[in-house]
Image: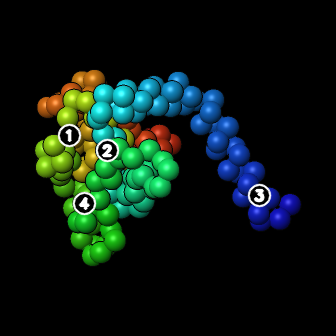
Amino acid sequence: MNAFERYTEQVRGVLDKVQKTQAVQIDKAAEAVANAVAQDGLVHTFGTGHSHMVAEEIVYRAGSLAPVNAILEPSLTGDQQVTKSEYTERMEGWGEIIVDYQQVSTKDVMIVISNSGRNAAPPSRWLGNVKNGGCARNRHSFQGLWSTGHFKAF
């Protein structure tokens, strides 16, 4: 088996695991997005570091879903001043400031992407409030996307 075949086999394995373990959660997230769009709400996406690229990938293109707002905070993406972003993504309270600035409403849905789920910027506002049924202040829908395996390793 060559390298490409090994790679595609590994990818299939990951996708199979996601399908078996996350289908219910993915269906719920899709329903939350559909509800937000049906109510003329926005789909906000957010990620720090490399995770911001997934948030950015969801942003509309010609012929696709348009009501998407990628929250691309320059001090958190790592596009510039990478070392700075390593510090800022660990600062408590950043998530709340960003959500307040973006004026996320109760009609909206948030999709937060985090590889590890351990940096403070996303969890301080979103991941930490999942138990409360959504974001604490505005009660909009929250959907998180992170690696549970990576999260548990920490």
Residue indicated by mark 4: 73
Q: Residue at x 70, y 43 (%)?
A: 13
Q: Position of residue 81 (x, y in %)?
A: 27, 76
Under tag 1, what secondary structure? loop
Q: CA distance from mark 4 to mark 3?
A: 36 Å
Residue indicated by mark 2: 44
Label located before the other in sequence (1 or 2): 2
Amino acid at the residue labelled 1: Val
Q: Could you classify mark 1 by the number of other residues whose Cα lies within 10 Å: few (under 14), some (14-19), or many (20 or more)?
A: many
Query: Would you say the residues marked 2 and 4 are in contact, meaning their CB atoms lie under 8 Å apart?
Result: no
Of the two numbered discs 1 and 3 in the rendering, the one whose residue sits closer to the viewer? 1
Q: Residue at x 33, y 57 (%)?
A: 48
Residue indicated by mark 1: 104
Under tag 4, what secondary structure? loop
Of the two numbered discs 2 and 4 in the rendering, the one whose residue sits closer to the viewer? 2
Q: CA distance from mark 1 to mark 3?
A: 43 Å
Q: CA distance from mark 1 to mark 2?
A: 8 Å
Q: Quadrant of residue 133?
A: top left
User: Does residue 25 appear anywhere in the picture?
Assistant: no
Label located before the other in sequence (1 or 4): 4
Q: Position of residue 2 (x, y in %)?
A: 83, 65
- Left or right of residue 3: residue 24: left
Q: Could you classify mark 4 by the number of other residues whose Cα lies within 10 Å: few (under 14), some (14-19), or many (20 or more)?
A: some
Label located before the other in sequence (2 or 4): 2
Label located before the other in sequence (4 or 3): 3
Amino acid at the residue labelled 3: Arg
Q: Residue at x 25, y 30 (%)?
A: 107
Under tag 3, what secondary structure? helix
Q: Position of residue 55 (x, y in %)?
A: 39, 52
Query: Which disc, if any, is residue 6?
Result: 3
Q: Could you classify mark 2 by the number of other residues whose Cα lies within 10 Å: few (under 14), some (14-19), or many (20 or more)?
A: many
